[in-house]
Image (cartoon, helix red, strand yellow):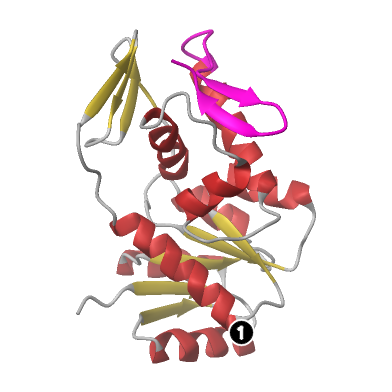
Amino acid sequence: MERYKILIVDDEQGIVTMLKDYFQFHGYLVNTAMSGTEALKEINSKPDIILLDINMPGMDGLEVCRTIRDHVACPIIFLTARIEEMDAIIGFQSGGDDYVVKPFKLGELGARVEAHLRRESRGGSGFSAKFFENLTINYDKRQVSYQDKVIPFTKKEFDIIELLTRNPGQVFDKERIYEVIWGYDSEGNSSIIVEHMRRIRKKFMEYTEKTYIETVWGIGYKWEN
C-alpha cells in the first residue's frame, strides 16, 4: 500500500507534534521543519504534499513557497491565523494551492489533504489534446500552447482550464469548480476561484486578446467555443 509523504512546516512545536502524530496515525510518512530554512532542506525528501505555516520568523511561509514553487509540483496548503481575503490572494500569488485557518479541526485538515492527494493521483482519460484555433490544450503533457508558444500555467490553473475545456459551453459555479479541482466540498472559497481566474486570464492576454473564459454573471464561468 502506497504511503504518502507529507512535510509539516510550523514554528510552533505543539502544532508540529499534533500534526505529526495525527498523520502518522493515518499512515503517512511525516517530515517536519520548524523554520523556513529547515523547510528548504526537507524539500529534498520529495514530499507528496506540504503543510506550510505562513507566520514564521525569518523566512516566512510565503517566501518559502515562492522559493520552491518553480521546482516543487506537489500541493502546498497554507496554515494561517490570518483571515483577510487579501492574505489569501497573496498566498495564491506565491504559489499556494489552498489554505486552512487556525485553529482548525484535524479531521477537516485531514480531509483536505486526502482530497488534494486524490486529485494529484487521478490520470486523464480519453483524447490527449484539444484545439481552439491557435490554442492547443495537451492533456497528457498538461500543457497549453498558443501558436506553438507554451503558456506557463501552474498545476491548479491547468486543472481549471482542463475542467472547462473538456466541457466547453457548460457553466460551472465557483463552488462546483472548487469541489472538482480542490476535491473538497466547502463554502466560502469564492476568492480562491476568482483569483485563479484572474491569473489565468492575465496569462492568456500576454499571448492573445482572447481570454477564452467567459464570466456568466451571477452564475459562474464557462469556456468560450
Dividing the picture into quarters, in which one does residue 150 lie? top left
- Residue 122 at what x, y percent from top left? 29, 54
Location of residue 200 with respect to 80 vertically, above or below = above
The image shows residue 90 at horizontal and vertical percentages of 67, 46
Residue 47 or residue 26, whichever sits in front: 26
Q: Please report the residue visible at 45 percent of the width from the left and 48 percent of the height from the top.
A: 69
Give the secondary structure at mark 1. Answer: helix
Q: Answer left or right for 194 relative to 83.
A: left
| Residue lying at 36% horizontally and 62% vertically, measured from the top left | 118
Q: Residue at x 28, y 22 (%)?
A: 130
Q: Is residue 170 toward the left or the right of residue 1 in the image?
A: right
Q: Residue furthest right?
A: 84
Residues drawn in magenta: 205-225
Q: Is residue 41 visible?
A: no
Inspect this view and state whether residue 26 appears.
Answer: yes
Looking at the figure, which quarter contains the N terminus? bottom left
Q: Position of residue 190 (x, y in %)?
A: 68, 46
Q: Which residue is mark 1?
A: 15
Check the image and report above or below for 163 versus 135.
below
Considering depth in this image, is 26 or 186 the residue closer to the camera? 186
Total marks shown come to 1
Question: Which amino acid lies under the numbered mark 1 shown in the image of this protein?
Answer: Ile
Q: Quadrant of the C terminus?
A: top left
Residue located at (46% from left, 38% from top): 160
Magenta-span inclusion, residue 209: yes
Residue 220 among magenta residues: yes
